Image: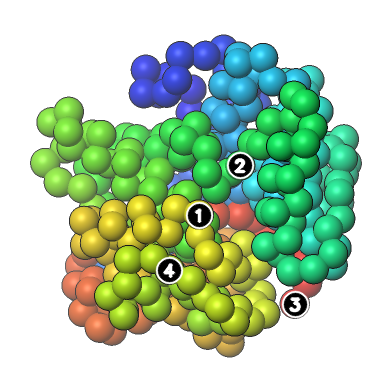
Amino acid sequence: MWRYAPFLPEVEPVSLGEGGTPLVPSVQIGPGLGVDLRFKVEGANPSGSFKDRGAAVMVSVLRAFGARSLADDSSGNAGAALATYAARAGLRALLYVPAHASGPKLAQISALGAEVVRVPGPRERATEAVEEACRATPHLVYASHNASPYFIAGITTLALELQEDLGRPPDHVVVPAGGGGLFLGLAYGFQGLRDRGWIARAPRIHIAQPAACAPLVRAQAEGKDVPTEPTPGPTVAEGARIPTPVRGREILAVLKRVGGEGVAVEESEILSAQRLLASAEGLYVEPTSALPVAALHELVARGAIAAGSAVTVVLTGTGLKATPT
């Protein structure tokens, strides 16, 4: 992705060859829905998810600023990406995780040499704990994947890559949304191309969330400016279970600007879409990655995506890191 360096902060890259992921045409799901569907397989990145794009830029910039110890709150793909690039850069990484966290991603984080700090209580408590630690600990930098502009800058390369892959923007892009960094990175990336006059239009970008925790989808449906989910439920799509997204107001404003729609997906639909991707397309992804595939059926059914449209679904992470369901 560093071939797009002129669009990124001017910094010496910390890189493991991230980006350049496959764009795979659908052989069954797309034809069945009557759309020209392609899958962007972001699980092919070094740590197994799209978050390597953001982590590579964020860690590169923070190292250039002189940071030596980085901290974040995540027991999932963001934590694995930060641990990966911190190790590559020779930096210390601390990941604050919920005490109940387990599974392959946490094992990956530990194997990469990051220090894991377990925090009792709900997921939100891990965020509070890392913020407290960074305020109290000299030289410990909060490398927040949800808040850092450098992380979002890395994600914009996905839009540039899709434009180069296709030679034109797709009509629609469908993505899962938790903290919303993927959605914002794509929106800002395509906006940059349009502002330069290199494309005439940007795609409509739609978001999918689990019905158990869908603050962005519900806020859009209710016409609210700020999303929040007061009683989030358990979901297999753990990467999207963020009750109060830090950039929530910004996401809703951009979602309206790009003409995107939100879809809340039931647990059974998530698991069904995960199985369908594997059996019909040969693509094994984690449950969070299956969210937009389940949502695609609803978007076509409600007429938000017309027959014959060019659609890209971003498959955010490999199924090899998923906790068995």
- The residue under the point 57% across, 30% down is 58
Q: Provide the residue designation for mark 1.
A: 246
The alpha-carbon separation of the residues under discs 4 and 3 comes to 28 Å
Q: What is the secondary structure assignment of the residue under circle 2?
A: loop
How far is mark 1 from mark 2, CA to CA? 10 Å
Q: Which residue, given by chain and number where applicable, does mark 2 sit on?
A: 144
Seen at 48% across and 63% down, the residue is 176
Query: Is tag 4's residue or tag 2's residue first in the polypeptide sequence?
Result: 2
Image-based side of 131 in relation to 217, left or right? right
- Whichever of callouts 3 and 2 sits on the residue coming sooner in the sequence is 2
The three-letter amino acid code for the residue at tag 2 is Ser
- Residue at x 15% of width, y 46% of height: 201
Q: Earlier in the sequence, mark 3 or mark 1?
A: 1
Numbered mark located on residue 325 in the image? 3
On the image, the x and y values in percent for residue 251 come to 37, 56
Label 4 sits on residue: 227
